[in-house]
Image (tube, grey):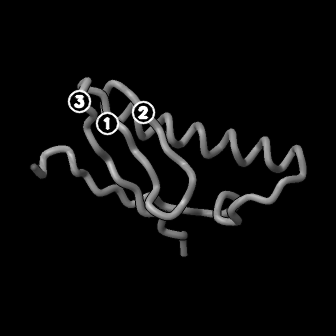
Amino acid sequence: MANIIEAIIERVKDGTYTVYCKNEIFSGAGGTIDEAKADMARQMEFFRITAKGEGFKYPAFLDSDYEINYTDYCNSN
């Protein structure tokens, strides 16, 4: 069973989007929601590869199957 990572999607005043994990250090940004999600996914993978290569500790879920559950707060004003 995959680990479930909770993430929040918000629209910024300049019209872009941010995505960030509720209980992890990861985030992303982009001109669309999909771009922001992809940016966060790239940053998660970059962090895993870098930490592994440098011998740093990192969240174990990054080496296993995980799923990101997004909560969209863009239209909840």
- Mark 3–mark 2 distance (CA, rounded to whole Å): 13 Å
Q: Look at mark 1 in the image and give the residue it sits on.
A: 33
Above or below, 43 relative to 52: above
Q: Which mark is residue 13?
A: 3
Q: Is residue 55 left or right of residue 71?
A: right
6 over 55 or under it: above or below: below
Q: Which residue in the structure is indicated by mark 2? A: 29
At label 2, the amino acid type is Ala
Q: CA distance from mark 3 to mark 1?
A: 14 Å
Give the foreground label among 3 and 2.
3
Where the N terminus falls, by quadrant?
bottom right
Report x, y in % for residue 72.
25, 51
The amino acid at mark 3 is Lys
Tell me if mark 2 has few (under 14), some (14-19) or many (20+) residues whose alpha carbon lies within 10 angstroms of its own.
many
Disc 3 crowd, CA 10 A, few/some/many (<14, 14-19, 20+): few
Kindly state the secondary structure of the residue where label 1 is placed. Answer: helix
Q: Secondary structure at mark 2?
A: strand
Position in image of residue 29 (x %, y %): 42, 33
The one nearer the camera, 50 or 77, is 77
Query: What's under tag 1, amino acid-wise?
Result: Ile
Q: Position of residue 28 (x, y in %)?
A: 47, 38
40 and 67: which is toward the camera = 40
